[in-house]
Amino acid sequence: MQAHHPGAADDVRQAIRSAFTLIAHYPDVGRRVRPRIRRFVVPRLPYLVYYTVDEGAGTVTIITVRHAAQSRRGLG
């Protein structure tokens, strides 16, 4: 993407970073897809952020970011 549309890659990167910030502030924003795994759809983009929340420790752990067309095997 960077070679063909340099600005587009930066836009995607910024959108994903914004999603991380939103998830950090509002960990329940994502849909629960497994008992401990949540999924958040990056607004206006076909990317999914999978993460866990440890309420006791007050932490959010990003597991992976995937394009929506990729296999969701094992994640939900």
Image (cartoon, helix red, strand yellow):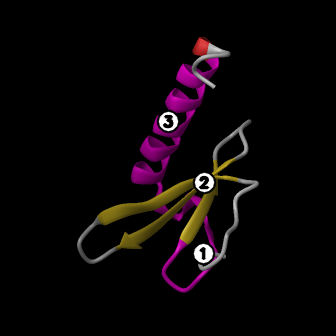
Specify the amino acid type for callout 1. Answer: Leu
Specify the amino acid type for callout 2. Answer: Arg
- Depth check, mark 3 against mark 1: the one in front is 1
Give yes or no for contact between labels 1 and 2 (Cβ–Cβ under 8 Å).
yes
Main SS of the magenta part reads helix
Left or right for 24, reference 68: left
Residue numbers of the magenta segment: 8-37
Identified at 49% across, 59% down, the residue is 64
Real-space CA distance between mark 2 and mark 3, rounded to the nearest whole angstrom:
16 Å
Left or right for 63, reference 76: left
Question: As drawn, which residue projects farthest toward the left?
Answer: 57
Question: As drawn, which residue projects farthest toward the bottom?
Answer: 35
Specify whether residue 17 is painted magenta: yes
Left or right for 51, reference 9: left
Q: Residues within 10 Å of mark 2 (few under 14, many from 20)?
A: some
Q: Earlier in the sequence, mark 1 or mark 2?
A: 2
Choose top left, top right, bottom left or bottom right for residue 6. Answer: top right
Q: SS class of the residue under badge 3? A: helix
Q: Does 39 appear above or below 67? A: below
Q: Which mark is residue 75?
A: 1
According to the image, label 2 marks what residue? 66
x then y, percent, for residue 36 = 48, 81
Q: Which mark is residue 18?
A: 3
Q: SS class of the residue under badge 1? A: loop
Quarter holding the C terminus? bottom right
Q: Does 11 appear above or below 42? A: above
